[in-house]
Image (tube, rainbow, N blue to C red):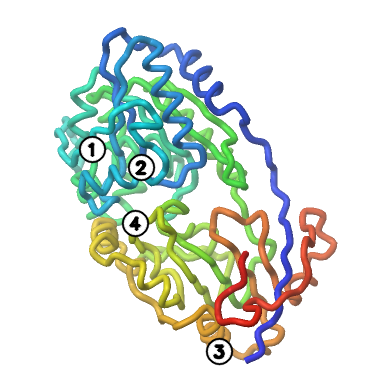
Amino acid sequence: MKIPSLIKVRHVFNNEHIRDIEGTVREQMQSSGVKIDKGSNIAIAVGSRGIKNIHRIVKAAVQYVKDMGGFPFIVPAMGSHGGATAEGQRGVLEGYGVTEEYTGAPIRSSMQVVELPQEGLENKVYMDKNAYEADGTIIINRIKYHTDFHGSHESGLMKICVVGLGKHKQALELHKYGVKGLKDMIVPTARQILKHGNIIMGIGIVENAYDDTAIIKALKPDEIENEEAKLLEISKGNMPYFPVDKFDLLIIDEMGKNISGTGVDTNIIGRIGIRGEKEPEKPYITNIVITDLTEESHGNGLGVGLADIITKRLFNKIDLKITYENVLTSNFLKRGSIPIIADTDRQAVEYALRTCGPIETENARIIRIKNTLELGEIYVSQSILEEFRDNRNIEVIGELRDLFGDGSELVYF
């Protein structure tokens, strides 16, 4: 089969970002007005997403608490991730560089929770036991659009209060309601945790389209709900996108939990994969091939079902026990389905092109990306390139090249 050659282009987005990460964290925590008493034990709740500079941000927060005379410790706030085990969740944090040695604070990882008052809510409310028993808890999370739903609050501080700090028990409690549990129940549940828990500060992070840290904002508990909604709008404006809305084949070199909670960002690929939920109108991609799973995923292949074809290399890296625990907790079974498995990258692409419908293969509209976080540089086929040659935000930075060189695996990105 004749597979079209691709050419690398640079898609230019707004690149404003913070250079002094540690200084900004300290300045924000200091100016927040939140007081940390000497001798107080302070939990710092950290999630399981691949947040740029998360290790530096956590370390800076730890140092600030120490400078104020407090005794900080870190708790994983990641629901069912890490196989829903204390050891697994510690491993996820360490995989992001958030280690005891680097941050200077102990990690207290446990799946134990305490139940907080419901006060009329349909669902129960839980909080990590170690965090609850501390003198105060600081939550840290990236604020961005969610991969399952859209609303005034999506992925951010309110969510980590609930599904993160509530551990596996809270994740099960909310996910049994499906999308409703996320879209309609997170905010009122977070209000209960802010009211009855011991949250003293939230540190919200917004990234730009290149996955660099653009905003770090320290917030008091009574500021979190309103300010997070504002930061979400900024985050949505920073969202990267494809230069065309419709094409035949998307090749994704890698997926993983450090890239998105769903392995691949559903907002980028235009597929949600939740029964009963309407799929996005754009982008429309006929077939999606994914070739590998990141090491940072620790075998969690949630989201693999959003692809049409995967490679045997990717499949062999999936730990089904870990993946299924995450999938079953979420209730979104489609995302854990195993697609067609190809022996090699070339075979995967050939399978995809064979099933794209009545197209001329040599003129197929193809885009290749490293992952759904990094869209600054992508490969496109000639048929797509012709559409945006005059676009000032697109710069050709390579020459047309064979995807596979002399072998069956994709050439280095």
Task: Give the residue type that dot 4 points to.
Answer: His
Q: In the picture shown, does residue 261 fall above or below 224?
A: below
User: Within 10 angstroms of label 4, few (less than 14), some, or many (20 or more) residues?
Assistant: many
- Whole-angstrom CA distance, mark 2 to mark 1, is 12 Å
Q: Nearer the viewer, residue 349 or 278?
A: 349
Q: Amino acid at mark 1?
A: Ser
Left or right of 326: which side holds 270?
right
Question: Circle 3 sits on which residue?
Answer: 354
Name the secondary structure under disc 1.
loop
Pointer 2 residue: 94
Residue at position x 34%, y 56% in the image:
298
Q: Residues within 10 Å of mark 1 (few under 14, many from 20)?
A: many
Viewer can see residue 185: no
Q: Residue furthest top?
A: 38
Give, as a three-letter code, the residue at label 3: Arg
Distance between mark 3 and mark 2 Cα atoms: 42 Å
From the viewer's side, name the closer residue of 15 and 318.
Answer: 318
Residue at 51% from the left image edge and 26% from the top image edge: 217
Residue position for label 1: 109
**Label 3 vs 1, first from the N-terminus:** 1
The disc, 3 or 2, on the residue closer to the chain's N-terminal end is 2
Q: How many residues crowd around disc 2 within 10 Å: few (fewer than 14), some, or many (20 or more)?
A: some
Query: Foreground residue, 115 or 405?
Result: 405
Q: Position of residue 171 (x, y in %)?
A: 25, 48
Q: Position of residue 405 (x, y in %)?
A: 65, 78
Badge number at residue 298: 4
In the picture as drawn, the residue positioned furthest to the right comes out as: 390
**Rounded to the nearest whole Å, what is the CA distance between mark 3 and mark 4?**
32 Å
Q: Secondary structure at mark 4?
A: loop
Q: Report the mark closest to the observer, 3 or 2.
A: 2
Please give the name of the residue rendered at 44% of the width and 11% of the height, measured from the top-left corner. Answer: 33
What percent of the width, then of the height, locates residue 131? 24, 28
